[in-house]
Amino acid sequence: MNIALGLGCDRGTPATTIARCIAEALTQAGATLADVQAVASIDLKADEIGLAEIALANGWTIRFYPATELALIAVPNPSETVRKYTGTPSVSEAAAILVAGADQTHLIIEKHKLRGPDGRNATVSIARIPQ
């Protein structure tokens, strides 16, 4: 299975929380880290240490999209709170769909959210990459 991950997180979310969120989402999807072919987030997170550590640990290059591009993607769970802070109603779902070159019908995991022990949140969405 070839899949794409869309990642979102609060500022300063530790890599351990992001990794746990990814692991939970992959388990729900019946997928493994080996299935991950593409990873994306919003450009506001390009300097996020936790995301950089996750990318390094897994040998991924994260593609960062501007809010204006993410905002054009139809998603099942848009959020006004997310729009207020980022300029787009979706980060993880839109990023997964965009980097997969797909549409919302390809989302396997919509918006898996995990609050870490420090109270910071990570979100992961998984899209199937069309063959």
Image (cartoon, grey):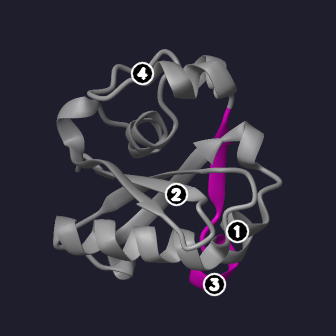
Depth-wise, is mark 4 or mark 2 nearer the camera?
Answer: 2
Q: Earlier in the sequence, mark 1 or mark 2?
A: 1
* Residue at disc 4, secondary structure: loop
Q: Residue at x 42, y 69 (%)?
A: 22
Please report the bounds of the magenta region as a residue range. Answer: 55-65
Calculate the distance from the C-alpha at mark 1 to the C-alpha at mark 3.
11 Å
- Can residue 85 be seen from the camera position used here? yes
**Dot 4 corresponds to which residue?**
73
**Dot 2 corresponds to which residue?**
122
Amino acid carrying label 4: it is Ile
- Residue 57: image tag: 3
- Can residue 87 be seen from the camera position used here? no
Give the crowd class for mark 3: few <14, some 14-19, many >=20 residues within 10 Å. Answer: few
Depth-wise, is mark 1 or mark 2 nearer the camera?
Answer: 2
Q: Earlier in the sequence, mark 3 or mark 4?
A: 3
Q: Residue at x 39, y 45 (%)?
A: 100
Percent position of residue 88, x then y: 57, 21
Q: Earlier in the sequence, mark 4 or mark 2?
A: 4
Splitting the image into 4 quarters, where does residue 35 fall?
A: bottom left
Outermost residue, bottom side: 57
- Residue 50: image tag: 1
Q: For this view, does 57 lie left or right of residue 103?
A: right
Amino acid carrying label 3: it is Ala
Q: Mark 2 and mark 1 in contact (Cβ < 8 Å)?
A: yes
Amino acid carrying label 1: it is Gly
